[in-house]
Amino acid sequence: AQKKSGGRTVQAADEYKCEVVSPILTYGDMADLQEVVRRLRHSGAFVNSQCGIHIHVDAGRYTPQTLRNLVNIIASKEDILYKALRIDPARLRWC
């Protein structure tokens, strides 16, 4: 964990770690999610190179074929997602 102290980033105890867990979101919820992130940042929260992201997809809405198509689309666009999310290339071994 890390925290800001005197304008610098320093090591911190585990109590500074957190995870944002949300209910199921739709595109219409993006403004609310952005507001949560803004408030966290305003309160001093930040991410570092240890931060990760994952998304759960409800497979119940898909047939096996459409789920396969979704996975293939995401896999073929991983490089764009990594760039958009500014994922450090050194972390790709975990992604």
Image (cartoon, helix red, strand yellow):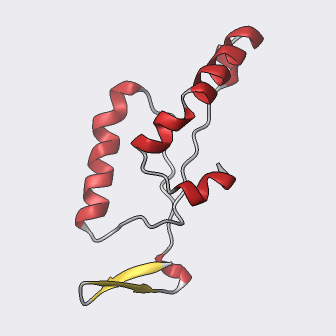
Residue shown at 60%/25% (left/top)? 76
Considering depth in this image, is 30 or 75 the residue closer to the camera?
75
Considering depth in this image, is 83 or 63 the residue closer to the camera?
83
Corner quadrant of residue 66: top right
Q: Is residue 37 left or right of residue 58?
A: left
Corner quadrant of residue 72: top right
Q: Is residue 10 left or right of residue 40?
A: right
Q: Where in the figure is residue 52, as x and y percent of width and height?
A: 55, 55
Residue shown at 69%/17% (left/top)? 67
Q: Where in the figure is residue 78, as x and y percent of width and height?
A: 56, 35
The relative height of residue 91 versus residue 28 in the rendered view (above or below) is below
Residue shown at 54%/28% (left/top)? 77
The relative height of residue 57 versus residue 4 in the rendered view (above or below) is above
Q: Is residue 27 left or right of residue 22?
A: left
In the image, farthest residue toward the right: 64
Q: Is residue 36 left or right of residue 79?
A: left
